[in-house]
Image (cartoon, helix red, strand yellow):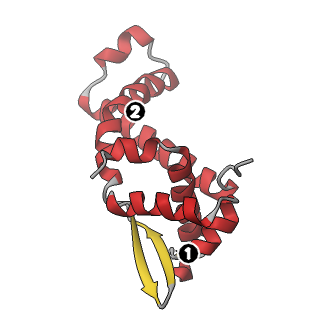
Amino acid sequence: MADIFDVVADTTRRDILAVLLERETSVPASGGEISVSEIVSTLGLSQPTVSKHLKVLREAGLVGVREEGQHRYYHLDRGPLEVLEDWLIPFVSSDAAADAATLAGVDSDDAASLNHDQLALASAIGKAFAETAQKVTAVVGPKKRK
């Protein structure tokens, strides 16, 4: 199985994940499921290209599939993304702590002296910001390939 970082490094796979996230948030009644043909139509890619990338995403556990006759309906599986989140949090938290310190009027030199509660708050603010940015991206929609 490919490393999760290698899987999401590909732009097309990230675009597919964005389409799945958008479906999940914009059409909750769908259970987040979308057909391969809808993904093809949304991204303007060929069906074989989309299927190839969906296979990689499926093998990495990032998407689930439901088969109905000859049709395949995919949905996002957030579980493996926790590995990415766990890896990213220390980087985001550092930035969040500095940003929170700036907002609180603390000099950047004093940011390192933030106590545990302040660092936890800064981390929560950073995480909330990242989640909000992702939701905005989902509402605006994925970039169309040219």
- SS type, badge 1: strand
Identity of the residue furthest to the front in this view:
48
Front position among marks 1 and 2: 1
Residue at 42 percent across and 26 percent down: it is 95
Residue at 40 percent across and 33 percent down: it is 92
Q: Nearer the viewer, residue 97 or 22?
A: 22
Identity of the residue furthest to the right in this view:
146
Q: Which mark is first along the chain, 2 or 1?
A: 1
Residue 109 vertical placement versus 121 (above, below)? above
Q: Residue 65, image x and y in percent?
A: 41, 75
Amino acid carrying mark 1 in the image: Ile
Q: Residue 37, image x and y in percent?
A: 62, 74
Going by the image, does 113 lie left or right of 104?
left
Amino acid carrying mark 2 in the image: Val
The residue carrying pointer 2 sits among few (fewer than 14), some (14 to 19) or many (20 or more) residues within 10 Å by Cα, namely some
The residue that mark 1 highlights is 34
Identity of the residue furthest to the top in this view:
109
Q: Residue 121, image x and y in percent?
A: 36, 37
Residue at 42 percent across and 30 percent down: it is 96
Identify the mark at residue 92; answer none if there is no mark: 2
